[in-house]
Amino acid sequence: MRLHEYEAREIFSKYGINIQQGGLAKTAQEALQIATDIGVPVVLKSQVLVGGRGKAGGIKIIDNLNEVERAADEILKSEIKGYKPEGVLVLKKIEIKKEIYLGITIERTSGIPIIMLCSEGGVDIEEVAHRNPEKIFKLSVDPLQNLYSFQIINLVKKIGLTGKTLIGVVNAVFKLYQVFKEYDGLIAEINPLVITENHEIFCVDAVLEVDDSALFRHPELNKRKLNNMSERDKRLMEKGATFVKLDGNIGLICSGAGLAMATMDLIKDYPPLSPANFLETGGGITSELMFDCMELVLEQPGLKALLINIYGGINPIHEGAKGIAKIIREKKVNIPIVAKALGNRQEETWKTLEEAGVYVIKESETQKAVKFLSELLGVKK
Amino acid sequence: MSILINRNTKVLVQGITGNIGTTQTKLMLKEGTKIVAGVTPGKGGERVENIPVFDTVEEAVNNFSSIDVSVLFVPATVAKDSVLEAVNSGIKLIVLITEHIPVHDVMEMKAYVFQKKVLLIGPTTPGIITPGECKIGILPANMFCSGSVGIISRSGTLAYEVAANLCKIGIGQSTVVGMGADMVAGTNLVDILKLFNQDKETKVVVLVGEVGGTQEEDAAKFISAKMSKPVVAYIAGASVPPGKRMGHAGAIIERGEGSAKSKVEALSVAGVKVANRIYEIPSLVKDLIS
């Protein structure tokens, strides 16, 4: 779960990281009110969950109070990369002497948290990391031990800081790691971490992504997430299904992410066929879950066919088949449905599907199902 | 021969009284797996399929002198606890089927089993099967047959498909290991490659990877330096568009590794026969075996 900047900065602040004065405005009038309270110059920042918003016009510096309302209105109305902003963050502008990059994430292969620090923070950090990887300093944290101050001091000294700013940045690293650990973070990032002329340290952008699997430990975030979801999406999440919208014409339901990706690779061999979505059921298939999955996938406009590719290991596919049959019975489904279903209780599964009018592929090769589907639609490789 | 498990392996099931635990216990017994005990706190003294249930792993271990493997069907919220319990009771191979475990818990488990020299397969693994001898986990047995190909897969259901397609042309498997699909895995591909490399009966290894992480790139380094057996690989997700990302930390840490292209290149350079599509695997294996 990705948090908005305004949410992440509040959490960082709660842990003692210094943030700029200001707050979130949902309307241009609210933005003006906040700007009046904190005084100009202010920075207006669009609250969207995508990167690169600065380059897309989502960040504006305003020196004159008369211009705040108009500029805020413009930001609130502008979509960025197709996303509508949730509001506009109005912040007191600070004088920047130096920008640092600070990020914490998980190194997947070793399964260890890594803290990264670079003296050249800002929007081009990935470019710096690519061109001069030696400028990124890293600290691995043993998951079974605490993080100690001396480790962080050693890290921060590597970017050449001394005295008051050294201690200030060490504190920021320590606190950000606390947030990362206590909030089950996948990524906690401050870019830039700003040092002012007065040697003060400010968090000027805040990124926090929380592990969805850990939301049971964070009821307030879980509640927020559920508030923004439909009943069906809630049921899908509860059962562990994952849906990603793509832009093709073949609906797809698979048990397993790897199987889904392999199937997508095969569909793309038959242009103009291409996957309309990625849907991974997880290991909790029930009749109801399959009904929900079908409904979700079939809602997509412009579908030519639906391909189901499932295995019965932990999943009771004979139960899943009942959900598929039910939705075909209840709703008018006028595109062909091809299903490959193998594993425990496959014969029962095939029978239910065939009786519902589904084309059943009883062989283990996914490409046979994809080929069958392409022939049905008159597409040749 | 096989790796990790065989007909003599003694198995404990943690979470045996739950719905999935009970269903899968029956299916494992049907394949000849020697399940000696189960554990569910509060259900000590009960029996599932005539297998005795204990409250703790320690009690189970005390009642049966040797338990080789524990397989877990426990809720994600208590998975870390259950894994640590199995480790502290002296079990050396742990198969964690449970999905959706917080990754911070997985990191702690991984560090702990490493310290204690225990092998943790999973989480989100379908388990391990040595066809005809022993099945530990949820793999549907009718997809597999006995033979001399080792399979390691980050994806569970793709492992089923690859095995079934090999069986169709008469090529069986020594052992099939599902590595688990989570962001962090208890055991990495390289650790299992090492075991297959030492196993006399395994002639060819099939590695099924997918986009994300750098395990396949590491495997390529090991194969090129140490592997004495031919390896066939497939990486799922060549056509998958990169997800929308926020924050730079992920990109900085992987530095261009992690894509299907990077993995395919690394493996090809290491001498691995890489299948572009899943259906090319059987013929590549057949060429190497004959």
Image: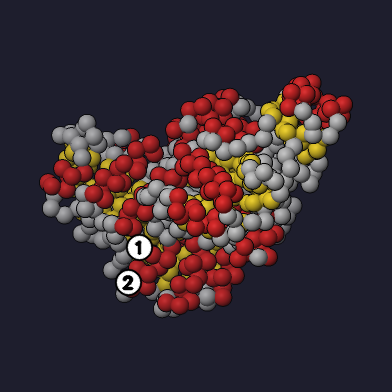
Residue at the spot 70% in from the left edge and 59% down from the top edge: A127
Which circle marks residue B175 in the picture? 1
Q: In which quarter of the image is the N terminus of chain B?
A: bottom left
Residue drawn at x 79%, y 31% is A40
Query: Is B80 left, or right, of A340 in this rendering?
Result: left
Which mark sits nearer the N-terminus, 2 or 1? 1
Amino acid tagged 2? Asp
| Alpha carbon separation for disc pair 2 and 1 | 10 Å
User: Where does residue B21 sit, x and y in percent of width and height?
Assistant: 31, 40
Residue A318 falls in image quadrant: top left
Q: Do the residues labelled 2 and 1 touch (CB within 8 Å)?
A: yes
Indicate which label's residue lies in the foreground, 2 or 1: 2
User: Where in the figure is residue A129, as x and y percent of width and height?
Assistant: 64, 60
| Rendered image: mark on residue A78 | none
Looking at the image, what colour scheme do you see?
A: secondary structure
The residue indicated by pointer 2 is B199
Which of the 4 image quadrants contains residue A6?
top right
- Give me the residue at 35% from left, 63% from top: B175
| Residue displayed at 60% across by 37% down | A18
Q: In this view, does A340 lie above or below B4?
A: above
**Where in the figure is residue A153, as x and y percent of width and height?**
50, 54
Residue A352 % position (x, y): 49, 36
Compared with B285, A34 (above or below) is: above
Q: Mark 2 lies on which chain?
A: B
| Marks 2 and 1 share the same chain | yes
